[in-house]
Image (tube, rainbow, N blue to C red):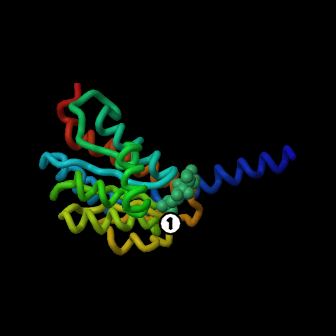
Amino acid sequence: MAYQLTSRIDEAFGKSLALLNAMASDEQLRGQIAAALDLCVAALRGGNKLMFAGNGGSAADAQHWAGELVSRFNFDRPGLSAIALTTDTSILTAIGNDYGYDYVFARQVEALGRKGDLLLAISTSGNSKNVLRAIKAAHAAGIAVVGFTGKSGGAMAEFCDICFQIPSNETPKIQEGHEFLGHLLCDLIEQEMFGDAKV
Ligand SMILES: O=C(CO)[C@@H](O)[C@H](O)[C@H](O)[C@H](O)COP(=O)(O)O
Ligand SMILES: [Zn+2]
């Protein structure tokens, strides 16, 4: 029992370290991070907002990252315009009940999204229908999309303007990769927009 426990813990550390190492040495990923940062900063500097959407653990990521931007990340600065489309239970239940769960994000993108906003769509499989519909609704409204998914990319990869494909097929490990990128983007956005004014 103790041996199994130890080996399982070792395995978890090993997989996460290998994942982060693979990401750290991926030059294409670095280019995508810079490009996603440009889209985020352009939207925010243009007076637009970032919208986040995802299911389950990715809903938690959406809320987490929007919170970092609206409140603060590393240092005090003006709040940044960001919203998670996963939080208003009245809206979610109304859309889910009246139109179906596949529409819970798309309907909000249609209602709240404006040309120049940015959608950050998170799906480990890349195949969640409500996320795919949100991406479609975003493009119809002139809103660019940064996707976060796994190695296969699923259906969403080809529809995103930039798509982060974490090099794993395991949902929790993909989520760990997403979490790293989400925090990194929050750090870079804050630095890019307010770093010079930092006291
Ligand atoms: O957090 C986890 C698994 O680690 C789950 O809650 C997971 O997010 C849910 O099963 C989601 O419904 C998966 O959807 P998706 O990532 O494939 O779009
Ligand atoms: Zn999870």
Query: Which class describes the residues within 10 Å of circle 1: few (<14), some (14-19), or many (20+)?
Result: some
List x then y, in percent, for residue 52. 34, 51
Q: Which residue is mark 1?
A: 125
Q: Residue at x 44, y 65 (%)?
A: 165
Residue 21 seen by the camera: no
Q: Which of the two residues, 17 or 89, is positioned nearer the viewer here?
A: 89
Q: Quadrant of residue 158?
A: bottom left
Vertical arrangement, residue 5 with respect to residue 104, above or below = above
Position of the C terminus, as image quadrant, is top left
Q: Residue at x 29, y 54 (%)?
A: 108
Q: Is 114 placed left or right of 6 in the picture?
A: left
Vertical arrangement, residue 108 with respect to residue 28, above or below = above
Number of dots carrying numbers? 1
* Kind of element beneath mark 1: loop
Residue ranking furthest to the front: 98
Q: Which of the two residues, 58 or 188, is positioned nearer the viewer here?
A: 58
Q: Residue at x 47, y 52 (%)?
A: 58
Mark 1, ligand 1, within 8 Å: the answer is: yes
List x then y, in percent, for residue 24. 45, 57
List x then y, in percent, for residue 148. 41, 60
Residue ranking furthest to the left: 46
Q: Residue at x 17, y 55 (%)?
A: 114
List x then y, in percent, for residue 115. 15, 58
